[in-house]
Amino acid sequence: MLSERRLEVLRAIVQDYVGTEEPVGSKALTERHKLGVSPATVRNDMAALEDEGFIAQPHTSAGRIPTDKGYRLFVDKLAGVKPLSAPERRAIQNFLDGAVDLDDVVGRTVRLLAQLTRQVAVVQYPSLTRSTVRHVELLALAPARLMLVVITDTGRVEQRHVDCPAPFGEASLADLRARLNSRVAGRRFSDVPQLVQDLPESFDRDDQGTVATVLATLLETLVEESEERLMIGGTANLTRFGHDFPLVIRPVLEALEEQVVLLKLLGEAKDPGMTVRIGHENVHEGLNSTSVVSVGYGSGGEAVAKLGVVGPTRMDYPGTMGAVRAVARYVGQILAES
Amino acid sequence: MLSERRLEVLRAIVQDYVGTEEPVGSKALTERHKLGVSPATVRNDMAALEDEGFIAQPHTSAGRIPTDKGYRLFVDKLAGVKPLSAPERRAIQNFLDGAVDLDDVVGRTVRLLAQLTRQVAVVQYPSLTRSTVRHVELLALAPARLMLVVITDTGRVEQRHVDCPAPFGEASLADLRARLNSRVAGRRFSDVPQLVQDLPESFDRDDQGTVATVLATLLETLVEESEERLMIGGTANLTRFGHDFPLVIRPVLEALEEQVVLLKLLGEAKDPGMTVRIGHENVHEGLNSTSVVSVGYGSGGEAVAKLGVVGPTRMDYPGTMGAVRAVARYVGQILAES
DNA sequence: TCTGGCACTCATGACGCACGAGTGCCAGCA
DNA sequence: TGCTGGCACTCGTGCGTCATGAGTGCCAGA
């Protein structure tokens, strides 16, 4: 078990390293922190911390830097979440309040997060499966070609073309539209399948094929996980990553371009609270030298999507976590209002 | 005036430099190209080219590299557009044919362009102002709160909330919806303002305020240039930019995050054909060490949006131009079909 | 258990030096 | 007039040497 002071030493090392980006030595530590002991004692503590795998030295005669395991301990036991200052809160609220539609909300959120944390921000659009249907619209583009538009309570709009097996009259169309809406409006996406199950039966034989096709398309739209969209921003902050450039940021940029990877990244966090993945805790190899801080946000009590930031493992965890949490809360409020 | 051979020397320098990324000397030139003259002669030619500002040497005792002016001459006079190979064309078509909706088309296009050119790709969504209205939908979210949805012939969907000055009945809503559609469906966005100008007058006094508000929102949606969306991809290719990393790509990443900058970048190209902006020809400072190749694309004969790539000034211009042109053509076809 | 002292390691930066790619210029030749 | 070979010169690059100093581990004493 590590003594109280050794934990204090680890905290000091993390803080200094995050600030200076340089390996920190025993002497510098005692000078910048009031540990109440001499450098020699700190050296012993550091040797112990190194044995346990919390810190490491890049070269024999250099200072120590925290390992992933060290950061993990720091985040779990030694650091809290640093709340934002009042002016920062006001700035967030003002900035987000100006949004005109969902795209704008997400866009502003991304920029805000990137600016506050000075890292790469990722925001998932409110997920379809967890939200409710506000309205379903059906239009005829041609006698046997429809457009299906689904509007969600979070303001998201999904559209699909539907090619019908047979021409579909205007009357039937209005009928279907009305019946569809009376059944699914206000309902959760996950409930829709059983709500519309028996709908084709109540139509003329001629129209049943078309109705079934429309319903199939509707369900496909709702369920389709792959359609989950997200937005990223602040990639310019990658340039503050480290010194050995291309090798580090290349894989990160590549990972950021793959929506699937990012969605998994955010999705992994099953925890309703905040999730922090440090270095090798990230499954994706390209992100092994980064840390990801993510959290769910939602319009009501429930999370409908996630957002987070990707930065170097050497990041200001308390500050980043504070910013991520605050932004998530305000976005939730905005969504609830609209 | 430059002699034929000197132009040939310039072409050789550009080609070699693009290939090797290293300053090219007189001896290497004569070895790799059949110029039919000795290195000494080439040296004289190079001195002349340098006097004219087409090439420069990084250090006194190094080879030459092309200047922006040199690339400009190369693009204008010395290089054609390299057509894609048959397999490449097939691959493009296959890849784009799989798209299910507009977002997907744009997304695939971006990835395709980035992969083909190994550079950063930018694709603008089909512009609202130049396309036509397919359908306008109005829904009541609350007695005095509506949602306006506009669907375009390119498959794009825009939505806005409308807060009404007074409650608006279901009958009035249906009436407005029908009249709106009969007037604007199938019409160009630019014609909409005058088509709806006198619409409020034909409504009850009580509803006129609401109708006017709805129309104002509609016009705002259509005109609003700032809402032009675009998608970028292939940012990982920035890592192949040069050796002096952070300084070069930082401003590029920043520029790429500002939609306004990018839209201007693509928009600048008034020319209906392909536009190439080399180095300092780009107004935005952050892009002074990049070249931009852009071209319009459209579903009919007319361009409805632009797409292009951003890469180092030292790029394979003929190949890049070929890829950009080919992709634009195929995207146009896809849009016309859907 | 902490502290001061001491020898040791080793990354870093400065300096000097040789190498060689590349140039400019010039005299000679077609 | 234009091309060519030759030659001296420049200067960036890579390499080995060396001194410096931050930082360490260990030990004896309090």
Image (spheres, coloured by chain):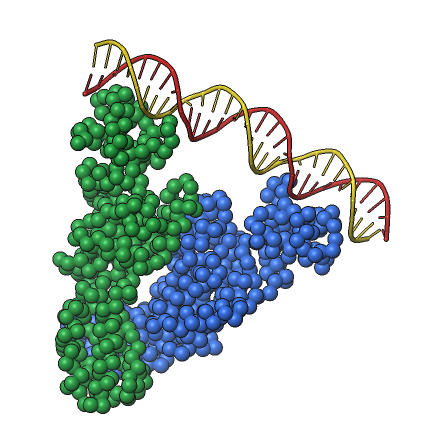
Chain colours: A green, B blue, C red, D yellow
Horizontally, is B105 left or right of D7 in the view? left
The residue sitting at 15% across, 78% down in the picture is: A197
Comparing A38 with B259, the one in front is A38
The residue sitting at 47% across, 62% down in the picture is: B116
Horizontally, is A136 left or right of A235 in the view? left
Residue B81 placement (x, y as % from top left): 57, 66
The residue sitting at 68% across, 47% down in the picture is: B27
The residue sitting at 37% across, 27% down in the picture is: A61
Residue A244 placement (x, y as % from top left): 42, 41
Tell me which corner region of the image, top left, top right, bottom left or bottom right, holds residue B128: bottom left
Residue A280 placement (x, y as % from top left): 30, 45
Tell me which corner region of the image, top left, top right, bottom left or bottom right, holds residue A305: bottom left
Regarding residue B220, the answer to whether it shows in the image is yes
Regarding residue B281, the answer to whether it shows in the image is no
- The number of discs equals 0
Residue A277 placement (x, y as % from top left): 25, 47
Comparing C24 with A207, the one in front is A207
Comparing A158 with A272, the one in front is A272
Horizontally, is B282 left or right of B60 in the view? left
